[in-house]
Image: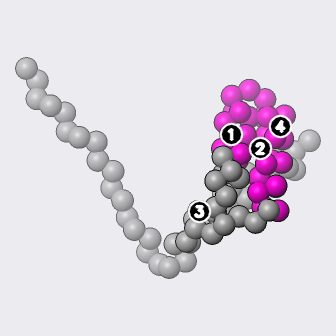
Protein backbone atom coordinates (compact mmCIF):
# COMPACT_ATOMS: atom_id res chain seq x y z
CA UNK A 1 0.00 0.00 0.00
CA UNK A 2 1.46 3.43 -0.94
CA UNK A 3 2.34 5.88 1.81
CA UNK A 4 -0.04 8.74 2.53
CA UNK A 5 0.83 11.89 0.54
CA UNK A 6 2.22 14.85 2.40
CA UNK A 7 -0.46 17.33 3.48
CA UNK A 8 -0.79 20.50 1.47
CA UNK A 9 1.09 23.38 3.07
CA UNK A 10 0.67 27.12 2.63
CA UNK A 11 3.53 29.38 3.63
CA UNK A 12 2.24 32.64 5.05
CA UNK A 13 4.27 35.76 5.65
CA UNK A 14 2.74 38.42 7.89
CA UNK A 15 2.65 42.03 6.75
CA UNK A 16 6.04 43.69 6.92
CA UNK A 17 4.87 47.16 7.95
CA UNK A 18 1.76 48.76 9.35
CA UNK A 19 0.72 50.30 6.01
CA UNK A 20 0.04 46.77 4.70
CA UNK A 21 -2.51 46.12 7.44
CA UNK A 22 -5.88 47.85 7.14
CA UNK A 23 -8.50 47.09 9.79
CA UNK A 24 -12.05 46.37 8.57
CA UNK A 25 -14.12 49.52 8.19
CA UNK A 26 -17.83 49.83 7.42
CA UNK A 27 -18.82 50.89 3.92
CA UNK A 28 -20.92 54.02 3.77
CA UNK A 29 -24.16 54.12 1.77
CA UNK A 30 -22.51 55.72 -1.28
CA UNK A 31 -19.83 53.03 -1.45
CA UNK A 32 -22.43 50.27 -1.16
CA UNK A 33 -24.55 51.89 -3.89
CA UNK A 34 -21.53 52.16 -6.19
CA UNK A 35 -20.65 48.50 -5.62
CA UNK A 36 -24.24 47.44 -6.38
CA UNK A 37 -24.32 49.57 -9.55
CA UNK A 38 -21.04 48.03 -10.72
CA UNK A 39 -22.33 44.54 -9.87
CA UNK A 40 -25.44 45.10 -11.98
CA UNK A 41 -23.42 46.56 -14.86
CA UNK A 42 -20.76 43.81 -14.81
CA UNK A 43 -23.16 41.33 -16.42
CA UNK A 44 -23.60 43.67 -19.38
CA UNK A 45 -19.94 44.61 -19.70
CA UNK A 46 -18.66 41.03 -19.37
CA UNK A 47 -21.32 38.65 -20.71
CA UNK A 48 -21.25 35.03 -19.63
CA UNK A 49 -19.61 33.35 -16.66
CA UNK A 50 -16.97 36.05 -16.15
CA UNK A 51 -19.58 38.77 -15.81
CA UNK A 52 -21.62 36.61 -13.45
CA UNK A 53 -18.55 35.96 -11.28
CA UNK A 54 -17.57 39.65 -11.13
CA UNK A 55 -21.19 40.63 -10.49
CA UNK A 56 -21.58 38.20 -7.59
CA UNK A 57 -18.26 39.21 -6.07
CA UNK A 58 -19.12 42.93 -6.11
CA UNK A 59 -22.68 42.32 -4.88
CA UNK A 60 -21.46 40.14 -2.02
CA UNK A 61 -18.88 42.75 -1.09
CA UNK A 62 -21.64 45.39 -0.91
CA UNK A 63 -23.93 43.13 1.13
CA UNK A 64 -21.13 42.34 3.56
CA UNK A 65 -20.94 46.04 4.36
CA UNK A 66 -17.25 46.20 5.31
CA UNK A 67 -14.04 47.18 3.58
CA UNK A 68 -11.31 44.60 4.18
CA UNK A 69 -7.66 45.32 3.49
CA UNK A 70 -6.53 47.59 0.71
CA UNK A 71 -9.29 48.48 -1.70
CA UNK A 72 -7.04 49.27 -4.67
CA UNK A 73 -7.91 46.08 -6.59
CA UNK A 74 -11.62 46.43 -5.91
CA UNK A 75 -11.54 50.08 -6.92
CA UNK A 76 -9.74 49.15 -10.14
CA UNK A 77 -12.43 46.56 -10.97
CA UNK A 78 -15.24 49.01 -10.20
CA UNK A 79 -13.62 51.76 -12.28
CA UNK A 80 -13.09 49.35 -15.19
CA UNK A 81 -16.69 48.10 -15.11
CA UNK A 82 -18.16 51.58 -14.83
CA UNK A 83 -15.97 53.11 -17.56
CA UNK A 84 -16.68 50.51 -20.27
CA UNK A 85 -19.42 51.13 -22.81
SS at mark 1?
helix
> Residue 56 bears which disc, if any?
1
Query: Which mark lies nearer to you, 3 or 4?
Result: 3
Left or right: residue 30 compared with residue 4: right
Alpha-carbon neighbours of circle 2 within 10 Å: few (<14), some, or many (≥20)?
many
Tell me, yes or no, whether the highlighted magenta stretch contains residue 75. no
User: Which label's residue is closer to the chain start, 3 or 1?
Assistant: 1
SS at mark 3?
loop
User: Which label's residue is closer to the chain start, 3 or 4?
Assistant: 4
User: Which label's residue is closer to the chain start, 4 or 1?
Assistant: 4
In the image, is residue 54 above or below residue 75? above
Which secondary structure is most common in the magenta stretch? Answer: helix
At horizontal 81% and vertical 40% (from top left) the residue drawn is 40
Tell me, yes or no, whether the highlighted magenta stretch contains residue 31. yes
Picture coordinates of residue 85, whole percent (x, y): 92, 41
The residue singled out by tag 2 in the image is 39
> Residue 77 bears which disc, if any?
none
The residue singled out by tag 3 in the image is 68
Alpha-carbon neighbours of circle 3 within 10 Å: few (<14), some, or many (≥20)?
some
Amino acid sequence: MPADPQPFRIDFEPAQNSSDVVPPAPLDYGEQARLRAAAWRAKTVYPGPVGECVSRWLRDWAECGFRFGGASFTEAVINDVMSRR
